[in-house]
Image (spheres, coloured by chain):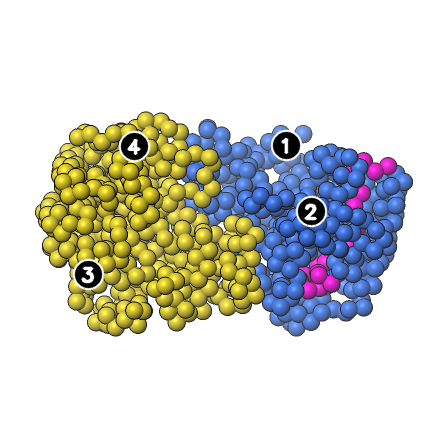
Chain colours: A blue, B yellow
Amino acid sequence: MKNFRIVAKDGKARVGLLTTSHGVIETPNFNPVGTQATVKALSPKDLNEIGVQMVLANTYHLMLRPGADLIEKFGGLHKFMNWDKPIMTDSGGFQVFSLGAALEHGGSKVLRKNTTPGVELKLHPRGVNSKPRLNKIIEEGVTFQSHIDGSKHILTPEKSIKIQQQLGADLIVAFDDHESAKHNYGEMQKSLELTERWGLRSLKEHKRTGVKLIHPPGGKLEQLMYGVVHGGTHKDLRVRSAKFTDEHFDAVAIGGIYGDKQTLCSIVEWVTSAVSEEKPRHLLGIGEVEDLFNGIERGVDFFDCVAPTRRARNGSLYICPKSGGKKSNSYTLNIRQSKFFSDKKPIDPRCNCYTCTNFSRSYLRHLYMADEILYHELSTYHNIFFIIDLVKRIRETIKDGEFKKFKRGYIDR
Amino acid sequence: MKNFRIVAKDGKARVGLLTTSHGVIETPNFNPVGTQATVKALSPKDLNEIGVQMVLANTYHLMLRPGADLIEKFGGLHKFMNWDKPIMTDSGGFQVFSLGAALEHGGSKVLRKNTTPGVELKLHPRGVNSKPRLNKIIEEGVTFQSHIDGSKHILTPEKSIKIQQQLGADLIVAFDDHESAKHNYGEMQKSLELTERWGLRSLKEHKRTGVKLIHPPGGKLEQLMYGVVHGGTHKDLRVRSAKFTDEHFDAVAIGGIYGDKQTLCSIVEWVTSAVSEEKPRHLLGIGEVEDLFNGIERGVDFFDCVAPTRRARNGSLYICPKSGGKKSNSYTLNIRQSKFFSDKKPIDPRCNCYTCTNFSRSYLRHLYMADEILYHELSTYHNIFFIIDLVKRIRETIKDGEFKKFKRGYIDR
């Protein structure tokens, strides 16, 4: 793909450069989630300081509030939220389907427990439902009720693409159907076929309306489109979906991941082995420390995940192995623990972020216990910095041919 | 007073320099409130960027959480919260008395409506009472129950001073009794006499224990002590209290202010006319736009107030007269209003803060409606910047002999 260039490889792990209308992104890359046109608790100034290269915003949330028409009037999401680096939007498919599909199959708890929703719901809901209510999936698209006010909406491939054009993201995603963990093989196959038809309609709509002239410095906005690979835990369906996506789209996203770490590794392995080398690959909604290593090892280029921001709000703060991070604690400490009451050390003594170079665990715990907003700013800053920095170091180890060694030293058995 | 030097005067308004162990403060000066060892939603980096020269922290809150012993172990509040410029702490008197005195006189609503409590309670209370419960005022001091866990405590002049020494503030306040708006003259007088006795005990304790060696760059920490002028709305009591305070203390704080703007002006006028020129004067808990002009006009040097931070959280954002600010809207707009839905202008087009140079009213309204933490950061940043910038401009007009002209152009009739 002309916009993507691989500059180094170490096994299947690779370092690449993706050129977008808002700048070049180095891969592997982690994209913080900015569901409602903001990465929770961080300003664009913070994101720039941290070294974030792209954020992912949620089409579903923005279409409902403040609405795509408003954002288009501002010249797109970049201007609306004052972020001049690349933005990716998702299709909205996951949000309108996730609960619905789960309900349909009586498996909402299972599904929701094992998936990372990929959206950052608000911190302090004002007594409204925080999930959309699904009405119906039909060939045309899906009808649903807003989680904000219960109003009825329809999302179709054409509408998803139109909204993503209005938002003006650099990377967009074709509208896709979502399988449930409780689907049997036949249902998975049917769902996959719908994703394929919707994918082609998404492409057709994008070609028909043409690339919108929005606001990037150069003038014209080029929107690259991801297709989404589905197929649950069935190898043949995943491979079929991977090949279909590779054939038709600019880039390959892997969706519908649930299950344990081993399942994730298998799915990623099947998909990256089936697609061409030169297209970017995004693992949707995944991005914990172990997942990053496992995904990159198997050739994944992009990750997005709410874990760093959500964990921060819950008191769960990343630490590296030398500071006590390990698989069993998910490479985190919990700042709420009383043992941190008088701890003068920073969250992670090996971290160079603003929070770690200026504040103690004791102070952060105090802010958490006192319910202070500054806690959210400082903790989120650290968690995002930690992941961005880790992925940066991984890029360096790939260039040096030291990725596997670095992984062995980082991820304990 | 050797630490304070007046460098310009315009009528009774004056520009001065107060030298503390953590640097020189230009007066008139506005001090944001950092109740729980943080100015709500702002980091020390933000405060420095804005140009804040001193913050005021609350002794009552910090003694209960995380406790003065912990903060002392860190070398004081400066190190604990990572703020290396001057800090003032209050005596804790207002917090333990305000509700109590009001309850005692059956006037809690009246008192609380007309006063600015001077503390920033937390944004999202976790189901605990947000006010202390008063038990008893005795000659020794006052017993009360914690608003956090109901535990019983006593605060005396000696204890208040000890805590303020542990916190290591540059400016501290003598322990004082608080009158209620419903007190009659005799009760006011009794309360004032108690304040005088407690003030002398505070001074004695401070001299006895000596100046603590804490952590400022120079080595020794010099703590200047404010006495607090009380006396309600009675001119003779205010003048008596002003003279007593002037005679005994390094600096003069004016407390117990309630009532309308005219009453405030009268009280300030009585006090500043009765004290010596060369001592700093602090108007406790006051700092709305009009109050700043009225206070400075009458010779006040310092202000602290939760209004900028609290207003921000409620959607009330400062605008100057040229942007529509006036007495009747308290120099604010309310960002919640639907008319701002698509407004591309910044909060105040004449403001140069980070928020106003980068974000629209529309975006801020969206963040507010979506309950995003970034709203609090950006809105608080603007409101504090606005007030700090206004007071800075006032200092300049005093130097230029243009204060009255500036006030006439700013405050409408």
Are tags 4 and 2 found on a single chain?
Answer: no
- Give the amino acid type for the residue marked by disc 1 in the picture: Lys
State the predominant SS element of the stretch in magenta.
loop
Report the residue at 40% width, 52% height from top: B309
The numbered mark at residue B298 is 3
Question: Mark 3 and mark 2 in contact (Cβ < 8 Å)?
Answer: no
Select label 1 or label 3 by which is in front.
Answer: 3
Task: State which tag comes first along the sequence, 3 or 4.
Answer: 4
Residue at which label 1 appears: A327
Specify few, some or many for label 1: CA neighbours under 10 Å numbering under 14, 14-19, or 20 or more.
Answer: some
Specify few, some or many for label 2: CA neighbours under 10 Å numbering under 14, 14-19, or 20 or more.
Answer: many
- Give the amino acid type for the residue marked by disc 4 in the picture: Leu
Report the residue at 26% width, 52% height from top: B259
Specify few, some or many for label 4: CA neighbours under 10 Å numbering under 14, 14-19, or 20 or more.
Answer: many
- Answer left or right for B121 relative to B206: right
Select label 2 or label 1 by which is in front.
Answer: 2
| Residue nearest the observer in this picture, B201 or B164 | B201
Q: Chain of mark 2?
A: A
The numbered mark at residue B134 is 4
Disc 3 is placed on an element classified as: loop
Spatial distance from mark 3 to mark 4, Cα to Cα?
35 Å
Specify few, some or many for label 3: CA neighbours under 10 Å numbering under 14, 14-19, or 20 or more.
Answer: many
Q: Which residues are magenta?
A: A162-184
